């Protein structure tokens, strides 16, 4: 029947968004491969490595018998890698003025797919991506999609943003939820989800592999609870829209710079606070929001292997594979977490 068909289509849209987010988890602004390649060219091709000699001078051509001072080489390597990383990051940010970043593309994709995302990174803090399609629907042919986008480009469709009075059409928000909402989330969904996973995992101790959703998981019972939670969240979102002037705010200076929560949060008992987040702050959940931390990680890995081998080329190779191993484990853990929170079997996450 029609309701069953609509449900199946919604599942495929959810799987599509989940897979796109899963792929986004280890994407970076700065290419680690390019950063190490440029660094290697400067150290070997331009002979900058010779500046770390025991008796350095501005002449990069020295006798091969001259020893290298590790402290000088460490300083030189850290400086070059950091400068290269910052330049590559700056170039990517400049390009984003014309070409959207992956996180911006994903935000647009949520709108086209008509799927909103609610992310919690703490008990009472998280992010909300408003993915409401301006056409009011997302199912249809390629011609329907083209017509919907053309209608939106002419400005005759409804806005994508959460606040209908917001001229910026903003879709991304940082939010603080009240304790009542968190308790409701735990009672309706989280407690039962974790209990079901724990019980089925105990029954499958001999199973090969540690799946986020174990064999025998009762999807039907938990799905009903998730539907109740979704309806409850929709109720909250509608309440925020109806009181947009009060509950949707701009971030203050302290909140933007230091991430300090609002001082009057306690006075909004029962109501979530939404803060405009045009910078797509939910990228902090994934690699894209920690670019400088990852650059420092790349530098540290190189410095460690260079200390062990005292060879620039070997250190670059080992640093690269160490980082790739770290990426692999981060991707695996992220996939399991995504599978658990969305109740999507890992076999559907490709």
Image: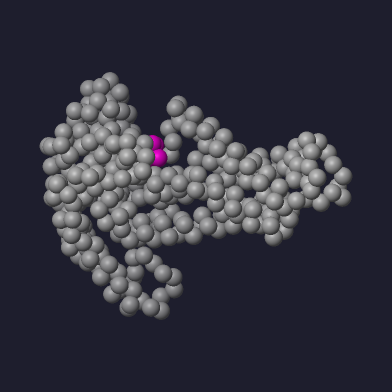
Point out residue 154 in the picture as x, y percentages from the top left corner. Answer: 28, 20
The residue at the point 25 percent across, 53 percent down is: 124
Point out residue 227 in the picture as x, y percentages from the top left corner. Answer: 18, 55
Boundaries of the magenta span? 103-107
The residue at the point 25 percent across, 70 percent down is: 195
The residue at the point 53 percent across, 32 percent down is: 91
Residue at far top of view? 154
State whether residue 236 is above or below residue 164: below
**Going by the image, does 336 lie left or right of 298?**
left
Q: Is residue 220 magenta?
A: no
State whether residue 160 is above or below residue 312: above
- Colour scheme of the rendered structure: one colour
State whether residue 9 is above or below residue 96: below
Point out residue 325 in the picture as x, y percentages from the top left corner. Answer: 55, 58
The residue lying toward the viewer, choosing from 126 and 139, is 126
Q: Count up the numbered dots.
A: 0
Q: Is residue 297 visible?
A: yes
Q: Quadrant of residue 147?
A: top left
Point out residue 337 in the picture as x, y percentages from the top left corner. Answer: 37, 59
The residue lying toward the viewer, choosing from 189 and 242, is 242
Q: Quadrant of residue 183?
A: bottom left
Q: Quadrant of the C terminus?
A: bottom left
Q: What secondary structure characterizes most of the magenta part?
A: helix
State whether residue 274 is above or below residue 218: above
The residue lying toward the viewer, choosing from 311 and 5, is 311
Q: Is residue 280 visible?
A: no
**Going by the image, does 305 lie left or right of 129?**
right
Residue at far front of view? 55
């Amino acid at each position: 029947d029609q309701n069953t068909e609509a449900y199946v289509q919604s599942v495929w849209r959810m799987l599509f968004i989940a897979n796109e987010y899963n792929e986004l988890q280890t994407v970076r602004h700065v290419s680690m491969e390019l950063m190490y390649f440029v660094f290697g060219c400067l150290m070997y091709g331009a002979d900058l490595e010779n500046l770390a000699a025991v008796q350095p001078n501005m002449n990069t051509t020295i006798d091969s018998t001259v020893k290298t001072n590790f402290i000088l080489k460490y300083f030189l390597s850290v400086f070059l890698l950091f400068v290269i990383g910052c330049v590559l990051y700056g170039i990517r940010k400049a390009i984003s003025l014309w070409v959207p970043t992956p996180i911006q593309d994903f935000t647009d994709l949520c709108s086209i797919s008509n799927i909103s995302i609610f992310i919690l990174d703490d008990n009472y803090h998280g992010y909300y991506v408003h993915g409401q399609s301006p056409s009011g629907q997302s199912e249809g042919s390629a011609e329907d999609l083209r017509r919907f986008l053309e209608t939106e480009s002419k400005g005759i469709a409804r806005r994508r943003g959460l606040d209908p009075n917001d001229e910026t059409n903003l879709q991304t928000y940082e939010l603080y939820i009240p304790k009542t909402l968190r308790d409701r989330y735990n009672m309706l969904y989280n407690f039962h989800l974790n209990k079901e996973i724990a019980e089925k995992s105990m029954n499958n101790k001999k199973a090969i592999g540690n799946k986020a959703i174990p064999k025998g998981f009762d999807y039907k019972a938990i799905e009903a609870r998730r539907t109740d939670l979704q309806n409850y969240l929709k109720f909250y979102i509608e309440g925020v829209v109806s009181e947009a002037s009060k509950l949707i705010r701009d971030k203050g200076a302290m909140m933007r710079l230091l991430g300090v929560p609002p001082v009057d949060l306690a006075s909004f008992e029962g109501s979530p606070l939404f803060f405009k987040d045009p910078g797509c702050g939910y990228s902090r959940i994934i690699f894209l929001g920690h670019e400088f931390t990852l650059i420092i990680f790349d530098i540290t890995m190189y410095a460690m292997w260079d200390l062990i081998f005292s060879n620039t080329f070997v250190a670059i190779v080992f640093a690269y594979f160490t980082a790739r191993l770290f990426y692999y484990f981060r991707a695996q853990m992220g996939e399991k977490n995504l599978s658990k929170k969305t109740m999507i079997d890992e076999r559907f996450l490709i």
